[in-house]
Image (cartoon, rainbow, N blue to C red):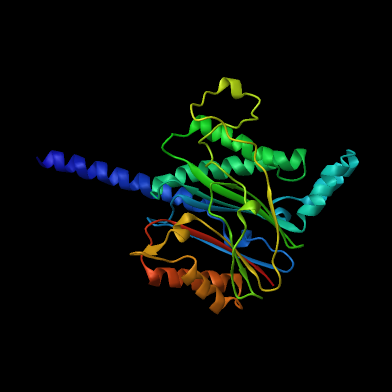
Amino acid sequence: MDDVIKDIRKSLRKLTGELDNFQEIAKYLKPPPGETPELKGVDIYGESMPLNGLVGGDHIIYMNFMKRYDLDARIEQAKRDGNTEIAENLIRCKTMAGIVLLDVSGHQITDAMLAGMMHQAFLLGAIYEMDHWGTITERLFENLNTRFYNSSSVSKFITMIYGEISENDTFKFISAAHPMPIVFSKARNKIVEINQDFYKAYPPIGTLPSQDDIDRRTTKSVLGYKKKYRVNTWTLMGSGDILLLHTDGLSEHINGEEEYCPDRLEGVLRKHCDGTSEEIFNAIKSDLLAFNTPSDDISMVVIKRE
């Protein structure tokens, strides 16, 4: 009996050590404060709040083009090669930043593995995009969708939004079944309702193969195929306006039958809209925790027009 107990304890220590090691690796995928994009007239701050442990199924990736890439060197190379369009795209990257917010189904620590796979796949694909086009195109997301369709379990999927915010007040984004961004108007002192005609969304990443994939004949799908991604373009953000990207942990946050969004969230935004993006984030975080204990990972990125 003593030997059995010793074996159980040994196995438990080994399992605990493996989970600790996994968390240690996964936490380095979280963007450090220095990766937060810095744009003229735009203040950005975001965090993930895992339900269990240090990491979970939510994940944020910042595309701070000025810090990730030597844009000047790339521009000069494109000009020497006669690639005028690539050079122009790279010049535009100087005045914009990209933000990825993704949510793996489930909120266990091990769900972070799928988020980590997406993290590396996205950044590797982004390098090729910058090399060939000087910007990130819809093609990257078609390839990601195909790759995860061919490699992920049918019981696991990823919702994702990738958006690019520019200094000229334009927000362009692709959504794969992700919650619609929330817009708070400073002038109107309220959350603005967005017409659904301005919001095209697609199935979660990896659930349906892409309709325009050149290799589609090698892929079988009983549920059909996904239409080609199209970019949503919003022109918004007057002075003091707030754009909030979030996972469904926020939009589905409840206390009994009372929903946190949009009314209570609107009250927090109204009260703290004069603060920095970090102060607004912390105000929302404190309030939603006071409202009720979360039942899912919650991630938010606050984008404020200064």
Above or below residue 5? Residue 192 is below
Left or right, residue 158 beside residue 11:
right
The part of the image, by quadrant, that contains residue 145 is top right
Q: Residue pushed farthest left? A: 1
Q: How many marks?
A: 0
Q: Residue at x 71, y 40 (%)?
A: 129
Specify the farthest residue to the top: 218
Q: Nearer the viewer, residue 198 or 176?
A: 198
Closer to the camera, 150 or 254? 254
Can you say which quadrant of the picture contains the C terminus? bottom right
Does residue 11 sit above or below 192 in this rendering?
above
Relative side of 189 to 134, left or right: left
With respect to residue 125, does 286 lie above or below? below
Residue 49 appears in the figure: no
262 or 13, which is in the foreground?
262
Residue at the image position 40 percent from the left and 69 percent from the top: 289
**Nearer to me, 273 or 256:** 256
Give residue 180's position: percent from left, percent from top.
56, 55
Q: x, y (%) of residue 72?
A: 82, 52
Q: Check the picture and name the quadrant holding the N terminus.
A: top left
Q: Is residue 279 visible?
A: yes
Q: Residue 201: image x %, image y %?
A: 59, 46
Q: Which residue is pictured at 39% across the width and 63% down the height?
A: 254
